[in-house]
Image (spheres, coloured by chain):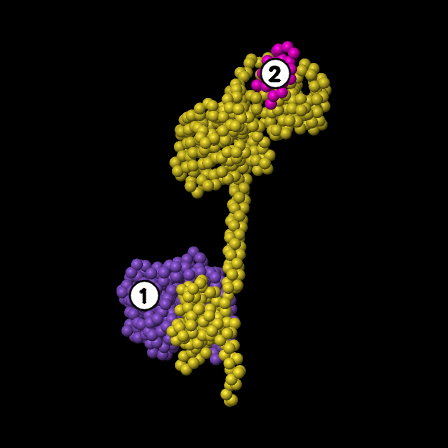
Amino acid sequence: MRIHDRHHVTLHGEGTPPLVFAHGFGCDQSMWRFIAPHYGERHRTVCYDLLGSGRSHLTAYDRERHGTLQGHADDLIDVIRATADGPVVFVGHSVSAMIGLLAGIKAPQLFAAQMWLGPSPCYINDGDYVGGFSRADVDSLLETLDSNYLGWASTMAPAIMGAPDRPHLGEELTNSFCRTDPDIARHFARVTFLSDNRADVPRLQVPTLILQCSDDMIAPMSVGEYLQRSLPRGTLRVIQNVGHCPHLSAPCESIEAMDGFLESLGLAREPA
Amino acid sequence: MSPPDEPARSESDALYEDAPCGLLLTDRDGTILRANRTFCRWVDVEPEALVGRRRFQDLLSVGGRIFHQTHFAPLLQMQGSVSEVKLDLLRSDGPPLPIVVNAVRHPHGDGWRDALAVFVAQDRHAYERELMLARKRAEELAARQLEAQDELRRADRRKDEFLAMLAHELRNPLAPISTAAHLLTRATSPEELQRIADVIRRQATHLTHLVDDLLDVSRVTRGLIQLEVETLDLRDVVDAAVEQTRPLITTRGHALHVDVPRGTCVDGDRTRLVQIVANLLNNAAKYTPQGGRIILEADSADGHAAVRVRDDGIGIDAALLPHIFDLFSQGERTPDRSQGGLGIGLALVRSLVALHGGEVAADSAGAHSGSCFTVRLPLSTLAAGRPVDTPVPIPLLRPLRVMIVDDNADAATMLAEVLGMSGHATQVAHSAESALAIVDPDTDACVLDIGLPDLSGYELAARLREHAPRATYVALTGYGQAHDRVLSKAAGFAHHLVKPVDIERLMGILATVAVRTDAPAPAQPQST
């Protein structure tokens, strides 16, 4: 199967370096709809769905390969090799930041830079490290997912209750957004929230932006600061935002921070 | 627009405040702007403590908050509404309250506001749990079924492999027999003939063992084995087994050390117990390289006797160990197939031991580390210390008149020749009719095939007895079941032999006939 089909890869724009966007846990590439178009005017943009999410080929989800984030990192390397000639700028939200980290360690030559939104190398507190959650909290999430089984199933084809003030929301989108197989979601949740990549962080030699929200329960400030301390070439930017999805709730602030970072590296481009 | 009518307004206020669901209005960051009385009652908090002070997500369990951030909020952001998301609401006391939430987002100024309807979902929660459990059980069942299917496939494959192996093993002795037959026509010296005869006898014995094992397996599988239980001294069982396997052990140059004290008694079938120990000894001899060491020992504890066969041979791979007693399972074969065998010996051992109420275990530290097989059997509950049968030495032979009846002409002729070489006078018949026609009244012994074409051997014995009343009758059949023995006994047969005939055993029987008929007034004692 072509990589493009397997990950439902969508390509826009022209210009180097290409930007490759990877979404976080619980959603799919439509998360980038407020940000990716901005970069599509300046760069080639590559959006894809993590295997098991969105419109990726669920049959290609392999519980063994995708039982660790390294499996997803290998997927990312495949996507980049199939869609770009030169090094790319990788944009990863939440768990995808760690997927970018692992891919960047394994194949540094593929990356000119990385930009992480709401990253966390470890969600569970451990000694001095404050990840934001106890093991019991994470177990509670997994429990919520288990008991929300029917909830997940129903969001596979979410009924629109009526959003008369959102005419821009096309039928095609509403019926596919965050489509998730409940079993894969539960598996991916375990892989995501039980992962610990702190030992890998110092090994990434690629310049990396840490886009930290001021009030994010999933990735608290302490985590962003930890990453800046541990990354050899990390830049921390904090934006005022409540929640874990600045690219949805604060797209302008996010773009501003990302543009600034690209400029500092000489990677920013003018609109075509 | 006219001002709202007061009663109507208070009615809609009441509807809002006491609606059969919790109603909330939140700011863009989730801060609660309004909450109806129903909701406040559920979370057991005064409205003042909620409005402007708490965010909706803060009222959720931690797992719910993560779910809210990663799924609920983005979904609401993207599609403007979410429906039927299940979450857990924390309460100031009592367990979390399962809820289902619907939400709609409305633009407000530069930002937005969310309207939420919250429903208690205790029943749905309970029935989802049931569904989850049922699903889990179904998955477990499906997994077990898959496992069972796999096992069936593996068994099927083992059976295929076994058939291939069986063909090979049966062909192995056939080739030298066929060559020997060819050589017989050219043999000139007695030494040469003897050598050829040795080959044929050895290969026929080998074939017989293979077929015996096969028949035993089939009987065990069909539950047709009946034990003839008696009290046995383990030492006698071990001696008989050693006797059977001595040729192989000697050929392979092994040192056999036996340490089995006399006096440990078990209740069991002599033939089967000997078969069990002989099988284990055979295995040890086969799977130990030339010049190895085999130890056979026994002891008793906790009401059980334990017989151990240890060797310093090729051992058992850890992966094979759990399956070593499975039918058709076998260690990797060496290229020269020096071990041979069908992989049914140990399966037989396990079944036979189980029939005796015992158990057998295999142990090995791995490849090339030797093996140890332990058979545990319950100690005898019958009177211990019964007199042990001592074998009667076979006395010198007097020539007898022997009639042989078998429709297999080759078998009959060969047997006659063998008996003739020992000095007996033989008459051969291939049917009941011809036997009755030629029978000599002074016949000492009649060896009768049971499956004759014209009369059954049982009937023939009854008819012959009228002509040759002194004769001892020996049944010769392909069936060795207890049932067949009962039939032959009832028909007046003194002995019952299973084909292919064990010549030494037949000679022994004839020897006792000779001894007895030397004495006056012979009776017809029953023995088998």
> Where does the image place residue B391, in percent across and percent down from the top left?
53, 18
Which corner quadrant holds the C terminus of chain B? top right
> Where does the image place residue B411, in percent across and percent down from the top left?
62, 25
Q: Is residue B163 above or below residue B77?
A: above
Name the element at disc 1. Answer: helix
Front residue of A94/B172: it is: A94
The nearer-to-camera label among 2 and 1 is 1
Residue under numbered circle 2: B513
User: Could one spot residue A263 in this view of the protein?
Assistant: yes
Residue drawn at (50%, 24%) of the image = B233
User: Could one spot residue B200 in this view of the protein?
Assistant: no
Chain identifier for the purple-coloured part of the image: A
Name the amino acid, label 2: Val
Q: Is residue B323 above or below residue B89?
A: above
Residue drawn at (53%, 48%) of the image = B148
Span shown in magenta: B507-528
Residue B360 on the magenta segment: no
Front residue of B46/B216: it is: B46
Chain letter of the residue carrying label 2:
B
Residue under numbered circle 1: A223
Mark drawn on residue B403 = none
Q: Is residue B171 above or below residue A32?
A: above
> Where does the image place residue A156, in percent across and percent down from the top left?
50, 67
Residue drawn at (62%, 20%) of the image = B526
> Where does the image place residue B51, in percent across and percent down from the top left?
41, 75
Q: Which of the 4 image quarters holds residue B472?
A: top right
For mark 1, does the 10 Å Cα neighbourhood hold few (<14), some (14 to 19), or many (20 or more) residues?
A: many
Q: Which of the 4 image quarters holds residue B180?
A: top right
Name the amino acid, label 1: Val
Number of numbered discs overlaid on the protein picture? 2
Chain identifier for the yellow-coloured part of the image: B
